[in-house]
Image (tube, rainbow, N blue to C red):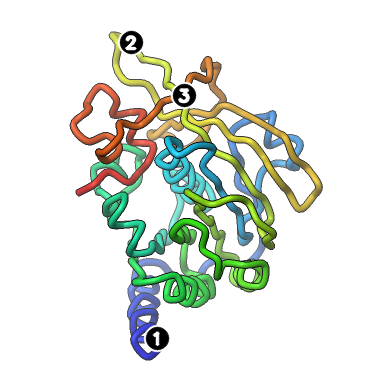
Amino acid sequence: MHESRTIMAALRARVGAIEGPKPAGVALFRLGSAMLDAPLGGGLPKGRLHELFAAEDDDRAAMAGAALMLAIQASGGRMGKGPLLWLRQDNGVKAAGRLYGPGLAELGLDPARLIEVVAPDEAALLRAAGDAVRCPQLGALLVEPWKAARGLDLTASRRLAVAAEKSGVTVLLLRAAADPAPSAAYSRWRVRSLASAPLEAGAPGHPAIGLELLRHRGGLEGLTARLEWNRDEQAFRETALSGAGLPLPAGRPAGAGDPDGQANTAVSGRLSA
């Protein structure tokens, strides 16, 4: 416990040095699709807990990339301020690798703006998340437990949700290998990878994902959209892709040694160092 407090104290000091106080008030961040933003009343609220699930095993990288893209949007997009904190569990890092700066840069994010913290186990991860969400200087918080994460029950998620509302920090919960369970999340999404449309001269296209709304506090569900990520604008936009899936090569990190698939695999934001 003492070690956890020491780590979080150092983290708060670092965050405070990067960014000043965050303005109060709740705002929305747009998803870039009229099919989603209009029914949602303009987008998703900041300062809330949102869950993302991978549609299939091969979609885990797309889910991680989508979470990072949403974090960028929630923190202000191109003009955003405040560091992004990504809390991960040791088992997950061993399985998928550490976050990779060039992969983050491919999404238009300055790697220096992201802080990666690896917790030794689920209990430490949830303690760190409970502390971090109370730090209003954060641009957004990503929490990535390992697999089922039985400790992340309705009570634990409610604590995160309440703290997020108080601090104004948007929390994105990444559930790569878990089934939806009762939680206090404001919204819940299923993410799948899509093949990107090639640019001129056969250049790799923009990273693309499919989003499906599974649950929303306002009672909505079933909304779907195909989105592609514009790294220059750091924003989503609708795409007319066919929806073909993009499986990741088995046994190697997303994007490793595959320059032709760079725009697609970079969506993970998790290329191994």
Residue drawn at point x = 39 percent, y = 71 percent:
121
Q: Nearer the viewer, mark 3 or mark 1?
A: 3
Q: Nearer the viewer, mark 1 or mark 2?
A: 1
Q: Amino acid at mark 3?
A: Gly
Image quadrant in which the N terminus is located: bottom left
Tell me the CA gap for discs 3 and 1. 43 Å
Which residue is under mark 3?
Answer: 245
Locate residue 40, reporting x and y percent: 73, 41
Q: Amino acid at mark 1?
A: Arg
* Along the viewing direction, whichever of 239 and 14 lies nearer the viewer: 239
Q: Nearer the viewer, mark 3 or mark 2?
A: 3
Where 231 sits versus 176, above or below? above
- Specify the farthest residue to the bottom: 2
Which residue is under mark 2?
Answer: 200
Which quadrant of the figure has residue 8? bottom left
SS under mark 3: loop
SS under mark 2: helix
Residue drawn at point x = 66 percent, y = 72 percent:
155
Which residue is under mark 1?
Answer: 5
Mark 1 vs mark 2: which is more N-terminal? 1
> Is disc 2 surrounded by few (<14), some (14 to 19) or many (20+) residues within 10 Å?
few
Where 35 sits versus 84, above or below? above
Q: Amino acid at mark 2?
A: Glu
Mark 3 vs mark 2: which is more N-terminal? 2
What is the count of numbered marks?
Answer: 3
> Is disc 3 surrounded by few (<14), some (14 to 19) or many (20+) residues within 10 Å?
some
* Along the viewing direction, whichever of 123 and 160 lies nearer the viewer: 123
Which quadrant of the figure has residue 196? top left
Residue drawn at point x = 68 percent, y = 29 percent:
34
Mark 3 vs mark 1: which is more N-terminal? 1
Q: Is residue 101 left or right of residue 233?
A: left
